[in-house]
């Protein structure tokens, strides 16, 4: 085959984000992490949500799926169960994950599937022009609601195994956290939940505020990310001090969803030979009890 | 004996029936369906075809519940009309059944709580005994009244005691020693009671060798089996009557074939899990009923827009809203044909019996992958949950066609791979996740051939046509309908699903009254095929029979083909299935004065 001007598959496209959008930082850190870990691109699926963040999968040469609003997690779980060999990364926004997808978020935390869930959290619905999201602070766009704290929720569910928070303005930490998350999931250890503070420069520019208020919990050597109760207490206290805890906050052990559900996780459902010919005798056993 | 009494005086006359109908009724939790199940098994051993149905309330215990078993020397797919035997655990069951009791009927009544007060035809024979009380006293378990009554029932039908015992063994052997032993004891007590009551066989059913190659199965179970045989390996659902049995069947059996059946947190999650699994390359299915389909509609549109293969089973129940969860209806035709915003392709197939449920599930899996769209299997409560006798499924007939699915070798032969490439039949070659060089972008936003979001006007118009083209292309592969009856008849029926049985029997009765009829059983609801037009051309009157108020199928046919002057509706929407007599009477009352000629 000669040299072709036309690429064989799609050419990644720069997302539609505003200059300075926090999501660029998330994308950059994600690319770096995937490169450093040498994850085979064809074995990687990036599941995007709806909203600005939902364009993240367009700029990577991996498999990309733009799921329904709020439905990244069920989709990603379906993918993982069908083929546990894949690196499955769901990456969506805070409205997507904590509002319309809130139910799925809870059950993903509970089930512990070995996938990465990155939430680009900016407290607002940017694409629809700045309505408050569940993580908006009181007063933003007139909201009178108490913000949702996903980290505390994740810590409160006893089968979570990886809870972290990054900030797109802190690349070094974010790259570390994304790598840790991917390694956790790809080792079959379960659900790697990473909330990333990712400012919306147009409707909720929180860069300066978050630079001041974020605290890297891992900087304190006495912080033990394996003690759920203490982590919960430290995170809660930090929040009550008006600070935002970041870092690898909790790491624990619990059986992964796929290991509990699949008979043979090593032989993926998705790549099975479906030809009935060799299975007729097994099929006939299904009939026996109806005779 | 103080505990027993009979109303019988003269020497019993044995009524010979080739078509037997037995109802067992009581309160939910009385074990009525167990008696039906046992009798069904016993009658199959003497060569009967059986069909049974349940009438239960949406609660775990209490409230009237009954099961009806029909046995025939011929294949049957309806509960028919009338009752030959009633086993009643309370007065309410007798009240419910009274109108249906035929002149020669026998009633077996549990008078543990009260003597029977309902006045029945004088020709009806009644055997009363304290089944519950005796089971409680002698076995310390009142619930065993069902097995006690089963013994008396078998005696009334002149079935050998051994046959009854075999049925008990068949049902309880797996449950272990105690359960089996107490049921065998209950059976003995029942036989003793029958002796005390002086029960003589008063109804007989022809005894032949059991027919080989037949199975007793529900439509839901047949769908589950068809899914496994057809290569289905990923199922996600949420409990809902009357589709839960599919979830249960697949949770029990799919792991044997290295597949998985998940119970999701809701139907929204279930359908998205299935979409994910399908993208990964697994043959995926969800099953639900109307209320669940409401929630799945979002995912349905995604499957249509993003062109992801998916099979959705919709077992209809009485709506709207929560409706009557355990009751029969066919009021979701519009729902499956029109659900979702925007225009997108879909297919709807409709099985009519358990065999069809098996084979059409295989077909649906093939259609979904071949045309890369959502395919509905439209069923109804009666089809999903009633047990019927059908030929064993022929697994060698199962063929798997995955359509334009590119392997790595295929990709090596092409220079460019676009997920949504424009093609003649609208179907673009697809890859599954993990294929080197098969990268795609898949999205529910409007997109170009690469799968990138696009609002370009020229692309939009072209790609909308591309997707809808697939419905036309699929017509050649859609399951054909079946035409029954007299080819020359000018009066016709059009229907689908579990109405098959009642309509065939109604046609027979109409035939005896001198009316020639024929019947088009639809198996493809969307798109409707030319067979509908041909059939309508060939008749003067077409009765569209369906269990709903507004005539949804009739509306769909008129919308597609017109013929408003020929189409007459026969509807039933009280939560119960059509009986042949309903169709006969509605046909005769609505037949044009010239008899449809």
Image: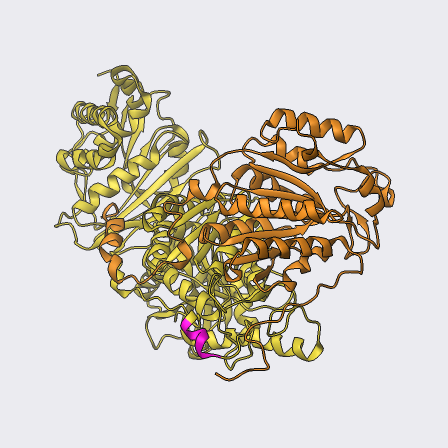
Vertical placement of A155 versus B320: above or below?
Answer: above
Quadrant of the rendered structure where residue A154 is?
A: top right
Vertical placement of B6 versus B484: above or below?
Answer: above
Q: Residue at x 18, y 35 (%)?
A: B164
Where are the magenta residues, as a range?
A: B409-414
The image shows a total of numbered marks equal to 0
Quadrant of the rendered structure where residue B521 is?
A: bottom left
Q: Position of residue B376 (x, y in %)?
A: 48, 60
Label the magenta part by its dominant secondary structure.
helix
Chain letter, colour yellow = B
Vertical placement of B446 versus A262: above or below?
Answer: below
State left or right for residue A269 relative to residue B457.
Answer: left
Q: Work out whether residue B31 can be spotted.
A: yes
Q: Work out whether residue B321 can be spotted.
A: no
State left or right for residue B171 relative to residue B423.
Answer: left
Q: Colour of chain A?
A: orange
Q: Position of residue A190 (x, y in %)?
A: 52, 41
Q: Is residue B400 magenta?
A: no
Quadrant of the rendered structure where residue B136 is?
A: top left
Q: Position of residue B566 (x, y in %)?
A: 50, 73
């Amino acid at each position: 085959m000669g040299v072709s001007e036309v690429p064989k598959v799609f050419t990644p496209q720069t997302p539609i984000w505003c200059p300075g959008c926090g999501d660029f930082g998330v994308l950059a850190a994600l690319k770096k992490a995937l490169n450093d870990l040498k994850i085979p691109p064809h074995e990687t699926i990036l599941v995007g949500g709806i909203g600005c963040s939902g364009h993240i999968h367009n700029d990577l040469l991996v498999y990309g799926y733009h799921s329904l609003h709020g439905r990244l997690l069920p989709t990603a779980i379906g993918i993982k169960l069908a083929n546990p060999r894949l690196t499955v990364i769901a990456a969506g926004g805070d409205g997507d994950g904590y509002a319309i997808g809130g139910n799925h978020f809870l059950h993903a935390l509970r089930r512990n599937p070995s996938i990465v869930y990155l939430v680009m959290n900016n407290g607002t619905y940017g694409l629809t022009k700045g309505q408050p999201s569940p993580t908006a602070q009181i007063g933003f766009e007139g909201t009178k609601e108490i913000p949702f704290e996903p980290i505390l929720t994740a810590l409160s569910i006893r089968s979570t195994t990886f809870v972290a928070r990054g900030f797109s303005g802190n690349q070094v930490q974010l790259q570390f956290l994304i790598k840790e998350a991917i390694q956790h999931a790809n080792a079959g250890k379960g659900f790697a939940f990473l909330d990333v503070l990712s400012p919306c420069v147009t409707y909720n520019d929180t860069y300066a505020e978050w630079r001041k208020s974020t605290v890297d919990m891992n900087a304190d050597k006495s912080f033990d990310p394996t003690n759920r109760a203490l982590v919960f207490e430290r995170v809660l206290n930090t929040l009550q001090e008006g600070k935002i805890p970041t870092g690898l906050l909790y790491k624990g052990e619990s059986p992964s969803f796929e290991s509990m559900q699949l008979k043979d996780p090593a032989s993926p459902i998705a790549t099975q030979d479906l030809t009935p010919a060799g299975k007729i005798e097994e099929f006939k056993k299904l009939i026996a009890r109806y005779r | 004996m103080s505990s027993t009494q009979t109303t019988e005086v003269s020497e019993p006359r044995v009524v010979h029936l080739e078509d037997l109908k037995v109802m067992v009724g009581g309160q939910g939790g009385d074990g009525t369906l167990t008696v039906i199940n046992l009798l069904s098994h016993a009658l199959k051993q003497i060569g009967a075809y059986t069909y049974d149905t349940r009438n239960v309330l949406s609660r775990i215990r209490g409230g009237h519940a009954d099961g009806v078993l029909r046995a025939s020397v011929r294949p049957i797919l309806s509960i028919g009309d009338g009752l030959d035997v009633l086993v009643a655990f309370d007065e309410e069951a007798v009240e419910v059944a009274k109108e249906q009791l035929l002149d020669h009927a026998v009633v077996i009544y549990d008078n543990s709580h009260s003597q029977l007060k309902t006045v029945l035809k004088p020709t009806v024979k009644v055997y009363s005994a304290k089944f519950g009380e005796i089971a409680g006293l002698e076995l310390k378990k009142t619930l065993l009244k069902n097995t006690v009554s089963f013994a008396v029932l078998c005696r009334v039908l002149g079935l050998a005691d051994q046959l009854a015992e075999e049925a008990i063994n068949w049902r309880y052997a797996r449950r272990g020693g105690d359960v089996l032993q107490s049921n065998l004891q209950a059976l003995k007590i029942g036989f003793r009671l029958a002796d005390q009551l002086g029960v003589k066989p008063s109804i007989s059913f022809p005894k032949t060798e059991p027919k080989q190659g037949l199975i007793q199965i529900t439509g839901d179970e047949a769908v589950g089996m068809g899914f496994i045989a057809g290569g289905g390996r990923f199922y996600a659902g949420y409990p809902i009557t009357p589709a839960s049995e599919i979830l249960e069947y697949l949770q029990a059996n799919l792991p044997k074939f290295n597949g998985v059946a998940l119970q999701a947190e809701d139907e929204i999650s279930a359908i998205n899990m299935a979409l994910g699994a399908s993208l990964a390359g697994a043959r995926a299915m969800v099953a639900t009923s109307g209320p669940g389909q409401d929630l799945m509609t979002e995912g349905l549109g995604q499957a249509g827009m993003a062109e992801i293969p998916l099979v959705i089973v919709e077992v209809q129940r009485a709506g709207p809203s929560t409706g009557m969860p355990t009751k029969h209806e066919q009021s979701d035709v519009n729902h499956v044909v029109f659900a979702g915003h925007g225009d997108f392709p879909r297919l709807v197939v409709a099985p009519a019996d358990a065999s069809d449920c098996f084979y059409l599930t295989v077909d649906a899996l093939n259609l979904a992958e071949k045309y890369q769209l959502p395919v509905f299997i439209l069923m109804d409560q009666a089809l999903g949950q009633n047990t019927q006798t059908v030929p064993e499924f022929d697994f060698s007939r199962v063929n798997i066609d995955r359509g334009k699915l590119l392997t790595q070798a295929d990709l090596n032969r092409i220079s460019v791979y676009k997920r949504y490439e424009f093609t003649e039949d609208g179907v673009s070659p697809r890859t599954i996740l993990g294929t080197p060089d098969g990268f795609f972008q898949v999205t529910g936003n409007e997109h170009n051939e690469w799968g990138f979001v696009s609002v370009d006007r020229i692309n939009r118009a072209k790609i909308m046509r591309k997707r809808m083209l697939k419905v036309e292309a699929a017509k050649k592969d859609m399951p054909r309908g079946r035409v029954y009856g007299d080819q020359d008849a000018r009066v016709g029926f059009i229907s689908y699903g579990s109405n098959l049985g009642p309509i065939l029997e109604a046609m027979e009765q109409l035939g005896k009254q001198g009316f020639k009829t024929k019947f088009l059983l639809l198996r493809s609801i969307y798109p409707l095929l030319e067979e509908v037009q041909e059939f309508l051309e060939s008749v003067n009157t077409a009765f569209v029979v369906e269990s709903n108020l507004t005539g949804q199928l009739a509306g769909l046919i008129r919308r597609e083909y017109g013929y408003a002057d020929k189409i007459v509706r026969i509807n039933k929407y009280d939560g119960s299935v059509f009986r042949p007599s309903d169709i006969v009477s509605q046909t005769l009352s609505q037949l044009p004065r010239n008899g449809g000629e």
